[in-house]
Amino acid sequence: MIKPLNLFFMGKGGVGKSTSSALYSVYLAEKGYKVLMVSLDPAHNQSDIFNKSFSDKPMKVTNAFSVIEVDQEKWIKAYLKEIQQQINRTYSYLTAFNLENYFNVIKHSPGLEEYALILAFNHIQNSFSNYDYLIFDMAPTALSLKFFNLPVLSLIWIEQLLALRQEIIKKREIITKIKLIKKEFERDKVLNKINEMKNEFQTLKNIFENNNETKIQLVLNPDQLSFAESMRIFEGLKDINIHVNQIVYNKKQMNSAGNELNKALSEIPMINFPYSETPLIGYDILMQYLKNNDNLVEKQLDRILMAS
Amino acid sequence: MHNVLKTIINKLFSAWKIADEVARDKAVETIETELEELNHIFGILVLGSFIGMPSPPMQISLDLMPLMEKELLLMLKKVDTANEPLAQLFSVFDIG
């Protein structure tokens, strides 16, 4: 079965990530593809754009197009509950540690936010593989970069922990051999878990790096601040071997010069979304926008999306 | 005569068994301490956030925590001996 293509929309706050991702979704749905738009931005905008309330279950806008809003809090809570239950099952001295209280604090830990997004992403990948396109409306830059960084960072730690664990197991085997003259050793659960995590993050890293599975759209506006932050996103992703596939130049004025863009960014295929006088709210208005000016926007999307 | 011989052989055998056990214990004593130290380092690396150390991405600690009761207990035990690291080291090498 062919896997859905993941399209991520990133960019500085307020440049129009939600509107751009909505335009892509409407365009693809109208072309006959099955599209699921996923809002990973904690401040969900899609309900305002489509004048409909959404939840963490896919809600249909048209037959081919559904929207889902990821509830970060819910994912963190469910994850911590699962860990706590596992601890209750396996620990015999739970009360001595007073871990229950500790868990109330853990849910506010830095790092769990992006992991909640990773959990949601995994769930969506596994549960909605019958779609042609998964369109991700991303969170603000800092959280989005952390999201893409998490597999790489986790793998660095996992490699170190794996090496240390293997040394521990080797030493333990020597002791068992000498003391008990045993030939068989019990399997180390911690090692198994570390290996399991390694596979999980390696798979995620591969998905993010693979151009046939993931495409990153960088949305920007014709202003210096947006250019500067876009450059930082571009560099940040390049450091972890993820490439920006398209620039979405949103609200471009006809007379604004494009040569202000940094050279590295100007070499990436670009789509111009001209400034719209009418607010782009509602499926029909978005569709109308694609058709305006002799199908100007649609032709660009045809050229870039269908070519790839 | 036969019985006496049997008793002597049995005694010799059990003495050898005890000596063997003691020798084996002695042989691994240092490795055991080293193992305990490694386990402790592993515990601190994974669960360092509990004692204010830099720690891996939170989900790595949390995912491993249900399997690491022993390491947590070891960390607590270490708190007791943290004041006398030299005394602990000397006792490992049987000095004094």
Image (spheres, rainbow, N blue to C red):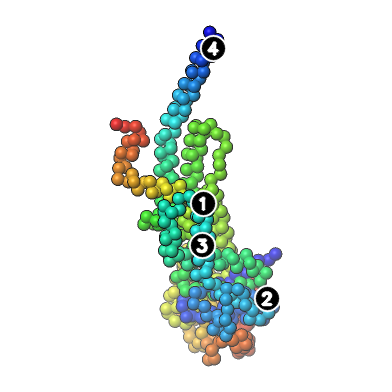
Name the residue that disc number 1 marks.
A90
Q: Identify the chain of the residue marked 3, using the numbered disc in the image.
A: A
Measured Cα–Cα span from mark 3 to mark 1 = 14 Å
Which mark is first along the chain, 2 or 1?
Answer: 2
Name the residue that disc number 3 marks.
A81
Q: Identify the chain of the residue marked 4, using the numbered disc in the image.
A: B
Measured Cα–Cα span from mark 2 to mark 3 = 37 Å
Above or below: residue B11 compared with residue A286:
above
Query: Are discs 1 and 2 less than 8 Å apart at CB?
Result: no
Q: Secondary structure at mark 2?
A: loop
Q: Quadrant of the C terminus of chain A?
A: bottom right
Residues flagged by tags 1 and 4 on a common chain: no
**Of the pair B31 and A27, the residue shown nearer to us:** B31
Residues flagged by tags 4 and 2 on a common chain: no
| Residue A105 screen position, x and y as percent | 42, 63
| Pair 1/4: label in front | 4
| Residue A92 screen position, x and y as percent | 48, 50
Q: Which mark is residue B3?
A: 4
Q: Amino acid at mark 3?
A: Lys
Q: Is residue B7 visible?
A: yes
Name the residue that disc number 2 marks.
A33
Q: Amino acid at mark 1?
A: Thr
| Pair 4/2: label in front | 4
